[in-house]
Image (cartoon, grey):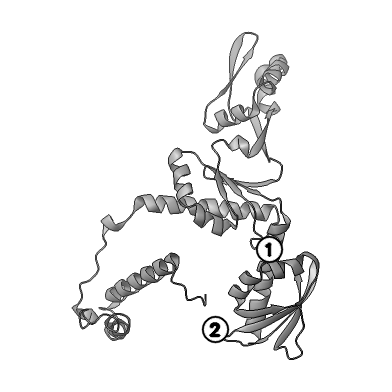
Amino acid sequence: FWKSEADADKNAAYLTLYRVLVNFIRILAPFIPFTSEAIYQNLVRSVDANAPTSVHHTLYPNADAASLDQRLLHKMRLAITTAGLGRAARGAADVKLRQPLAKARVNVGTQQEQDDLNDLADVLQEEINVKAIEIVTEVGELVEYKILPNNRALGPRFGKAFPKVRNALLALNPAQVAQTLQAGQPVQVEVDGEQVDLTSEDVLVQTEARGGLAIASDKGVTVAVDTQLTPALLQEGYARDVVRQVNTMRKDAGLEISDRIELAYEASGDVAAALVNFAAYIKQETLAVQITAVSFSDALAQQTVSVGDQEITLALRKA
């Protein structure tokens, strides 16, 4: 939040906020004329000498239906659903959001939705904290299906023929059965030369994530995150934990947001390796000009914290 880079996301956020505020004070002007005028002079006239001299000289805002981008709204709703499912899948696997993962695999219903998610892959990578987003066309790539006859429904219906119905059902491809039922269509089996229709009330469908995946589904979207952690991913997660701990220490020590610091640590193993390998990232996120394994005698703040399964000591002082 202290960074000075004028990246596209930040500029878009600033411009959107500015537009909303300017229109909002124009809406408020008839109701709180003096307050809205003071805000207008500070917000608009101070940066645009050609703007009307008073908020009361501007036109009252009118809604512009043409400015609504329905395509973008749909894409963002889909992205929000997908990101939420990705976080839910992480939570189900007890993997905290700060821990980067290799990949999230997503299945959606239409080609248009697949294209939309590809357009927003960079946003989803950041929101789910994964290195890559992969769109899969078949949900069966993410889950394994198991189908079972609903004995309570089929037993009374078929009586002595129930074992034959059960065997015919279990001989079918579970993924195809699941997809047919999810589409609202009956599944057909042949018993004694006759075609029998089975509905979703007759068949129980169970799903299980394929090995190494954690899954969440809703609104026709299925997201699976790869929960296998490499040493590099673990170290990056440790580095993010260190950043969080250091920034908490900065705040507790009363440092200003822009204050530069020197950081010292006592750690071993993978956590120590993370502090070395991700030093540039830690410096950037904590405003540290130096990171050293040598302790300070004049530390402004020092604390023992948990990172991964290790207790480490962090110390900082003003640079």
Q: Position of residue 68 (x, y in %)?
A: 32, 56
For residue 310, above or below residue 250: above
- Which residue corresponds to mark 1? 237
User: Farthest top residue?
Assistant: 193
Which secondary structure, mark 1? helix
Q: Is residue 61 left or right of residue 16?
A: left
Mark 2 surroundings: few (<14), some (14-19) or many (≥20) residues within 10 A: few
User: Residue 251 is drawn in which quadrant?
Assistant: bottom right
Q: Is residue 246 visible?
A: yes
Q: Which mark is residue 258?
A: 2
| Along the viewing direction, whichever of 103 and 295 lies nearer the viewer | 295
For residue 21, above or below residue 302: above
Q: Is residue 206 visible?
A: no
| Image quarter (top left, top right, bottom left or bottom right) of the C terminus | bottom right
Q: Position of residue 256 (x, y in %)?
A: 57, 86
Q: Is residue 5 left or right of residue 106?
A: left
What's under tag 1, amino acid-wise? Gly
User: Farthest bottom residue?
Assistant: 298
For residue 3, above or below residue 157: below
